[in-house]
C-alpha cells in the first residue's frame, strides 16, 4: 500500500503537467473556435458564435477536409501494402543474421531530418529529376507527390508493429494450418491476417494521424494543394478562431478514428 502511494505521489507531477499542458491546450483551442475575430483589428472577440463551424460546412472547406482524409487513407493503405510483405520477409524469410540489418535499414531513416527527406523527394519529383530520368515520367508536384512523400516518411511506423506481430506469431499455428490441409492463401487469410490486424491498426494510428496533420511536406511537394494543415497555417494569424475550428475538426476526426480502431485491440499494441 505504501509503495503504491509513493508511486502515485511520484507520478502526480507529470500527470498534472499532461493535463494542464496537453488537455488544457486542447480545451483552449476548442473554446477559441466559438469566438469571433474583429474584422478591423484582427483581434479575437470572446463572444460565443457558431459562425466558424458554419464556414467549415461550406463546399470549399468540406472539399479540403475530404481531400485531407483521402490523403491520410491512401497513405495508410500504401503503407500497409508495402509493410506487410516486407515485414514478413524480415521476420520469416530472411536469415537471422540479416534481420538486424534489415531492421536497422527501417530505423535509420527515422534518424534523418524530416526536411532533408521531404526536399529529397521534391528533387526526385521535379521535371528532369530521378523519377522522370528513370521511368520517363513524373507526377510532378501535387496530390500524388504528397501521397508518395508521406508514404515514405511514415512507412517505418507501419513496418515496426507488423514486424513485431510476425515475430510473435507462433510457428505451430502455421504448421497446424498446413497439417489440416489449408493452402498458403487460406493460412494467410484465416491465421495470419487475424494476428496482424491489431498491429496494422496500431501502425495506422501513426500513419493516419501524421498524414492528417502534416502541412510541411504538403508545402514542399504539394504545389498549390490545400489540406487541413495548410488551411490552419494560413488562417492562424488572420483569423485565429477559424483556425482553431479547423484544428478542432482534425482532432474530432482522430477521436472518431481512435474509437473505431479501439475495438481491434490496436491501442494495446502502441
Image (spheres, rainbow, N blue to C red):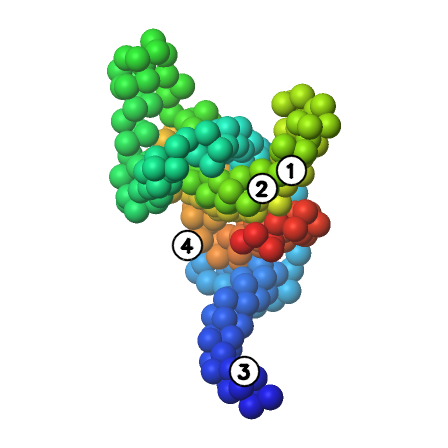
* Mark closer to the chain start, 1 or 4: 1
The residue at which mark 2 appears reads as 169
The quadrant in which residue 138 appears is: top left
Q: In the rendered view, does 63 fall on the left or right side of 259? A: left
- Residue at screen point 73% across, 28% down: 180
Quadrant position of the N terminus in the picture:
bottom right
Please give the name of the residue rendered at 29% of the width and 34% of the height, measured from the top-left corner.
Answer: 119
Q: Secondary structure at mark 3?
A: helix
Q: Where is residue 266 drawn, in percent x and y?
A: 61, 49
- Relative to 167, does residue 20 appear above or below in the rendering? below
Q: Give the CA distance from mark 1 to mark 2.
A: 8 Å
Please give the name of the residue rendered at 54% of the width and 53% of the height, measured from the top-left corner: 270
Chain-order first, disc 3 or disc 4? 3
Q: Is residue 94 visible?
A: yes
Identify residue for label 3.
Answer: 8
Question: Where is residue 195 shown, x and y percent of the image?
Answer: 63, 41
Q: How many marks?
A: 4
| Contact between labelled residues 2 and 1, with CB atoms less than 8 Å apart | yes
Question: Circle 2: is it few (<14), some (14-19), or many (20+) Cα within 10 Å?
Answer: some
- Residue 175: percent from left, percent from top: 63, 32
Instruction: Write the residue at 46% across / 63% down.
Output: 43
- Frontmost of labels 1 and 3 is 1
The earlier-in-sequence mark between 3 and 2 is 3
Q: Nearer the viewer, mark 1 or mark 2?
A: 1
Q: Which residue is mark 4?
A: 237
Q: Dot 1 corresponds to which residue?
A: 173
In space, the residues marked 2 and 4 are separated at their CA atoms by 51 Å
N-terminal of the pair, mark 2 or mark 4, is: 2
Q: Secondary structure at mark 1?
A: helix
Residue 212 image offset from top left, x and y in percent: 52, 43
Amino acid at each position: 500500500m505504501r509503495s503504491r502511494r509513493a508511486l502515485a505521489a511520484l507520478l502526480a507531477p507529470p500527470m498534472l503537467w499532461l493535463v494542464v499542458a496537453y488537455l488544457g491546450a486542447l480545451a483552449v483551442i476548442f473554446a477559441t473556435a466559438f469566438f469571433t475575430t474583429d474584422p478591423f483589428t484582427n483581434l479575437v472577440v470572446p463572444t460565443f458564435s457558431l459562425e466558424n463551424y458554419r464556414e467549415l460546412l461550406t463546399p470549399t472547406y468540406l472539399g479540403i477536409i475530404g481531400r485531407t482524409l483521402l490523403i491520410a487513407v491512401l497513405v495508410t493503405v500504401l503503407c500497409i501494402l508495402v509493410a506487410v510483405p516486407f515485414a514478413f520477409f524480415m521476420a520469416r524469410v530472411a536469415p537471422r543474421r540479416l534481420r538486424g540489418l534489415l531492421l536497422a535499414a527501417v530505423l535509420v531513416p527515422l534518424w534523418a531530418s524530416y526536411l532533408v527527406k521531404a526536399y529529397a523527394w521534391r528533387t526526385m519529383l521535379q521535371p528532369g529529376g530521378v523519377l522522370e530520368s528513370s521511368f520517363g515520367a513524373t507526377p510532378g508536384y501535387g496530390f500524388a507527390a504528397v501521397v508518395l512523400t508521406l508514404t515514405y516518411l511514415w512507412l517505418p511506423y507501419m513496418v515496426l508493429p507488423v514486424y513485431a506481430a510476425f515475430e510473435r506469431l507462433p510457428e505451430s499455428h502455421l504448421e497446424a494450418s498446413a497439417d489440416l490441409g489449408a493452402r498458403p492463401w487460406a493460412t494467410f487469410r484465416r491465421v495470419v491476417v487475424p494476428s496482424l490486424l491489431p498491429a496494422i491498426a496500431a501502425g495506422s494510428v501513426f500513419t493516419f494521424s501524421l498524414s492528417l496533420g502534416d502541412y510541411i511536406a504538403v508545402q514542399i511537394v504539394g504545389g498549390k494543394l490545400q489540406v487541413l494543415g495548410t488551411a490552419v497555417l494560413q488562417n492562424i494569424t488572420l483569423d485565429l478562431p477559424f483556425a482553431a475550428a479547423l484544428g478542432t475538426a482534425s482532432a474530432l476526426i482522430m477521436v472518431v478514428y481512435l474509437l473505431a480502431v479501439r475495438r481491434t485491440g490496436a491501442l494495446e499494441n502502441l
